[in-house]
Amino acid sequence: MKSTRRKFIFQVSTTAAGAALLPGLTPRLRAATKSANDKLNVAVIGAGGKGSSDTDSVAKLGENIVALCDCDEKTLNGRGQAYPEAKRFRDYRQMLDKMGKEIDAVIVATPDHHHAPAAIMAMEMGKHAYVQKPLTHSVYEARRMREVAKEKKVATQMGNQGSAEPGLRRAVEVIQSGAIGSVKQVHVWSNRPIWPQGIPRPEGEDPIPETLDWDLFIGPAPMRPFKKDVYHPFKWRGWVDFGTGALGDMACHTANMPFRALKLGYPTEIEAESSGFNGETYPKSSKIRFEFPARENLKPLTFWWYDGGQKPSEEIAEKVLDLLATQKDKDGNPKPRKLPGSGCLLIGDKGHLYSPDDYGAQFFLLPKADFEGYQGPPETIPRSPGHYKEWVEACKGGPAAYSNFDIAAYLTEIILLGCVALRTGKKLEWDGPKMRAKNAPEAAQYVKRVYRKGWHV
């Protein structure tokens, strides 16, 4: 194995390969474990959107879809045509109450504010849980999801599919081998939001569509009037009562690789700059700084997040631009010498690692000349059999999925601190174990929300 630091472009196929455990984690006994040949009975909460592809992916593995739940009857009936034997519900609380004994596992793909209430209710009944990203709507909910999953010994996975990519796992191995030295800065930027943000709440009220149960859509959030084409479907992401903005939506993908590789843990300081926060929707653009202390044998580092067109400075970008100038687009034309809409750059004292996509499936070691001929360390992280198959196998007693809630809830909790900083407008001095801002007690209302009557976690 060569150890010279020369250029090597790790460009790995997006084909998934093998289930993996995080270093130091071991499989746990599972609730309601089935044999590898038995089919899981899966209930889906949030049948449309990403829930549609999640459902189809699990069904293609041979598992039974026994129930579908959605507050929009139009969506529910449309998906019901693909799964005619699945029972249909509008309210997941009723579904779990009536069908609890018939369900082994749930898929949760609702708007963010329903993730924790639905998944925690299911896990407390001993059901395995696959939950879309971001795992939760609040910091407190992420902590609670992690605790319940551990207590109930259920198989879990968050829907950040890049975790199954061999390229992401290889990047973790390369970084932890010391190839780029001690990492002092991480820069992650996103082309989100692609939905409305930075807008006020509209006045007035529109008739609620006959197919939509608006009360169920609101769920644990404060009640508000229905407005056509404002919240449902999809546009809920930018509203603070329902979504987590560009940061919550994408950082579970784009920050996943550096979070794992650098063992980031709790930050001690978070500060946000933005285009302006109006209390209703997240800003059109933001730049957020996280300070992480020394941990294990790793030095302190600064993590920067950018969205809404914000990007790293020209000085930082220069570390990547020479590489981009040598690449061609899908039509064979030279790529422009500018940063793409999304990316991730780790700056070490011996070199840099750059990933040009949201999922960490592909990465490059820079400067190019320094890594020529570099082969990298031996594989230490098992490769994935496929994102969904990892979870299904875990439900049947196999190894924990790589993005199980032990790690996914921790990642989500840290990411959502950026949302808290945006909402408070203050630099936060953070006490991670106690989930509190030492200098800003008003942040507590954004760490843990007040739930509307009838809803809890």
Image (cartoon, helix red, strand yellow):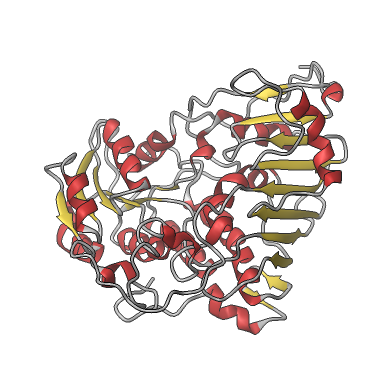
Q: Quadrant of residue 441?
A: bottom right
Q: Is residue 251 visible?
A: yes
Above or below for 418 versus 429: above
Which residue does the image show at 77% across and 49% down from the upper left?
Answer: 312
Q: Nearer the viewer, residue 224 or 159?
A: 224
Q: Name the residue located 47 percent from the left edge and 63 percent from the top edge.
A: 243
Left or right, 176 with respect to 256, comes to right
Q: Nearer the viewer, residue 129 or 211?
A: 211
* Side of 107 where 184 appears, left or right: right
Residue 350: x %, y % from top left: 87, 35
Rendered residue at 38%/34% (across/down): 389
Q: Look at the image and tell me whether residue 20 can be seen.
A: no
Judged left or right of residue 193, residue 323 is right
Q: Residue furthest left?
A: 85
Residue 142, image x, y percentages:
50, 63
Indicate the position of residue 435 as horizontal and vertical percent values. Answer: 60, 72
**Residue in front for this viewpoint, 337 or 131:** 337
Q: Residue furthest bottom?
A: 441
Residue 129 screen position, x and y as percent: 36, 51
Q: Write the residue at 33% across / 47% down.
A: 51
